[in-house]
Image (cartoon, rainbow, N blue to C red):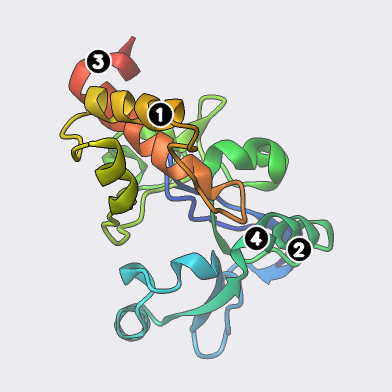
Amino acid sequence: MKTIKRKKAISIILASLLSVSLTACGSGGTDSGTAAGGDSKSGKVTLELAISKSSQDSAFIQQDILDAFEKQTNIRVNLQLIPAEQTTTVLQTKLAVDETPDIIQYNLASAVTDLNLERNFEILDNEPWASRIVNKDVLSSGGHLYSFHVSQDTGMQGVVYNKQIFEELGLSIPTNYEEFLAICEKIKASGITPVFMPYKDAWAANIWPAAAFADFVAKNEPTFLMS
């Protein structure tokens, strides 16, 4: 029996303050016995995974892992690499013309408005693995689960400082946040911008304060998300 329906894709928005997973829609006919991109004769299924080029080196999309996954499950994963600065525009266009990939990497909080989450994405509440998810609230919106975590590289963030300015102003490298703020004030008082972030794309500026906020809350308000 053949059914025509809007196809909803499982977008991977790496949840938390930085990212998450969803399920987006496209249109087309699918056989009840096959999944997206399925071949009813061979039983093989092909899934389209759209991710930002900024994540192309992430462990979860290493080709050897994808090959092993295909061998074990008969599911092939095709990668669609989208330029980071064009991700929202490209996905909005794909949604508009019903060419949405099966799985999308995007930020869940942003997807609520950017990609019209409730209209275009699959609710995952009843998936068999949903009950095993930790911190489900950060993967949900409007009381429903729309996303899942993926294991991504552990990134490192830091601040590069100008040694000459530190020497001229008699400053030492700060060892805590309070010292960092005090040094920033001294640098500012000397007529120099204390912190400069040469980011072309605005989203990049969210990473540092978001990570800092999460770290601060974890250390000082461990029950913050429970209240």
Disc 1: which residue: 137
Figure quadrant of residue 194: top left
Disc 2: which residue: 94
- Nearest the viewer among 171 and 197 is 171
Quadrant of image for the C terminus: top left
Disc 3: which residue: 221
Residue type highlighted by circle 2: Lys
Q: Name the secondary structure under disc 4.
A: helix
Q: Are marks 1 and 3 in contact (CB under 8 Å)?
A: no
- Nearest the viewer among 112 and 42 is 112
State the CA–CA distance, disc 3 to disc 4.
34 Å
Where does residue 63 sit, x and y in percent of width and height? 37, 84
Q: Name the secondary structure under disc 3.
A: loop
- Nearest the viewer among 44 and 189 is 189
Where does residue 113 sit, x and y in percent of width and height? 70, 36
Mark 4 or 2, nearer chain start: 4
In the displayed structure, 177 sits above or below 73; it is above
Mark 4 or 1, nearer chain start: 4
Q: Residue at x 29, y 57 (%)?
A: 155
In front: label 4 or label 2: 4
Residue type highlighted by circle 4: Glu
